[in-house]
Image: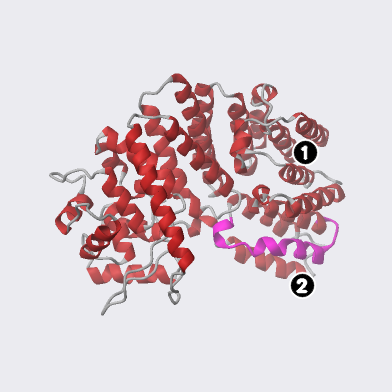
Amino acid sequence: MGGWSKRDVNRLRAQMARQGRSLEEMAAEIRQMTGCSPLASFRTALGWSQPEVVERYAESAPGSVMDQPLLSRLEGFPAAGSRPPQATQIITLASLYGTSPLRLLSPTALDRLDEHERAVLIRCNAAFTAVPAPAGPPARENSTALAISQPPTTPRALSATDHLERQVDMAARRALRFAVTAEGSNIGPETLDQLRDEVAWIAAAYPQQPLPSLLGDLIDLQDVAFRLLEGRQRPTETSELYVLAGAISGMLAKASHDLGNPQAAMTQARTAYVCADNAGHDGLRAWTRCLQSMIAYWAGWPNDSVRYARLGAQPAARTTGTSSVWLHAQEARAWAILGDADKAEAAIIRAADARDAVRGDDLDALGGIMAFSRPRQLYYAADARTWLPGADDLAEQAATEAIDAYETADPAERSFSDEAGARTDQALARVNTGNLDGAAEALRPVLDLPPGQRIGGILTSVMRVHNALRHSEHRAASIARDTQLAIEAYTQVPAAAALPNGR
């Protein structure tokens, strides 16, 4: 492990475990610090020795061959002279380590695999999306092994239900392993179904889970989609792959934006649009133009925001999905920040009319961030009106309606970021009308968000409240100063600080 001793690595792992870092975060940092392979980094993050892994491997896959020299060679791949692993070996190790197979191989290592073995791993990856982390090894003298994915606590005994769930998971993986091996081509209906399921899972999770917990999966999934597109498929399969790759790239654009990097966000969004164009998919074309307009809006480029919204008008007119609603709602915000109240209000009305015409499309079927819900539409209307002089009462009314709509919506339509945006709009409107206590109350749930959910748009929104409190008529109020101090402390720990090194 380079210049790192075993004691150094144990100390690093113990420190990260005390911080409540996940298995993936710990493995990434160990890999970066020591230069070891992903396969070795996950074993090290768990605190397991090679003999322990060999023993657990034999218990998990009776009859399979695994010994310490073989494990050493697998961990050394693709070094010169090392033999490539078999897909079944990586899948079994992924089950043991509580991660997904593609996390155990670097892109270089994946490229060196036989085409069939690589296809098997890619198809199996979906089954590991929600695999629970394994329990730590049995306590032994001088052992520094720690349970991963939870902050260090007293280990609890596994219940009968836990054992049953693990058996069901293992049986499902065995069945999937057989199915994808039997299919044995570059891509088939099972592969597309699994990729679609993973895209839908992340789309649904994105508005509700901290970004650091999803970013690694998004990056891996984009790599899978691009590698599949490099193969040969039937035209209909290629078209669907482009749609899924475009959706993934769009979500990575949103992630880059949320982490405060609009240039990287625009690069990902352009890739998403290329995918939409190659697929001939008007819904994805319109959705991507909305995304570009939104990125430009938050980056402080309002004229570009209007331009992207207008570019999306033609494909939006040819789709029946909610991306057409998003397009007009986003255009309203862009006109509002430019100070054109008439065009902003006209766009809000067009968004309402588009909502009445929605019949849904395949992007709406993916759900989550790929769909534009009614509560989100209300939030956008509130956000637009916070920029318009004399519209504070309308802004507070729309923000309150958005908050109420989110609180009574189906759980699948909840979004921590957009709910936070509606609450900051409510707070801003109250500051502008002199209701400082009400503003502090509206902002309290936003300031309670953990660091992993403090994405760029939320930080920008709460700073708008901070700036509004600087006006001379508010400066003497203690509640104004207290709220500003709370905002300043909050913005010093953004979502980017919760990411593991190297992501």
Q: Nearer the viewer, residue 49 or 447?
A: 49
Quadrant in which the N terminus is drawn: bottom left
Q: Is residue 438 a member of the stretch shown in magenta?
A: yes
Q: Give x and y (percent) for residue 385.
A: 79, 44
Above or below, comparing residue 452 to residue 364 in the picture: below
Name the image quarter holding residue 22.
Answer: bottom left
Q: Nearer the viewer, residue 163 or 435?
A: 163
Label 2 – label 1 distance at C-alpha: 32 Å
Callout 1 amino acid: Gly
Magenta-drawn stretch, dominant element (helix, strand or loop): helix
Mark 2: few/some/many CA within 10 Å (<14, 14-19, 20+)? few
Q: Which residues are magenta?
A: 432-454
Q: Residue at x 77, y 42 (%)?
A: 381
Callout 2 amino acid: Ser
Q: Is residue 316 a member of the stretch shown in magenta?
A: no
Mark 1: few/some/many CA within 10 Å (<14, 14-19, 20+)? some
* Farthest residue, direction bottom: 141
* Farthest residue, direction left: 81
Q: Is residue 327 in view from this perspective?
A: yes
Q: Nearer the viewer, residue 338 or 28?
A: 28
Secondary structure of residue under mark 1 = loop
Q: Which residue is mark 1?
A: 339
- Left or right of 343 in this view: 421: left
Q: Give x and y (percent) for residue 220.
A: 41, 43
Return the mark for residue 381. Answer: none
Q: Residue at x 28, y 33 (%)?
A: 115
Q: Give x and y (percent) for residue 318.
A: 67, 21
- Left or right of 50 in this view: 184: right
Q: Is residue 262 in view from this perspective?
A: no
Above or below, comparing residue 464 to residue 12 in the picture: above
Secondary structure of residue under mark 2 = helix
Q: Which residue is mark 2?
A: 478
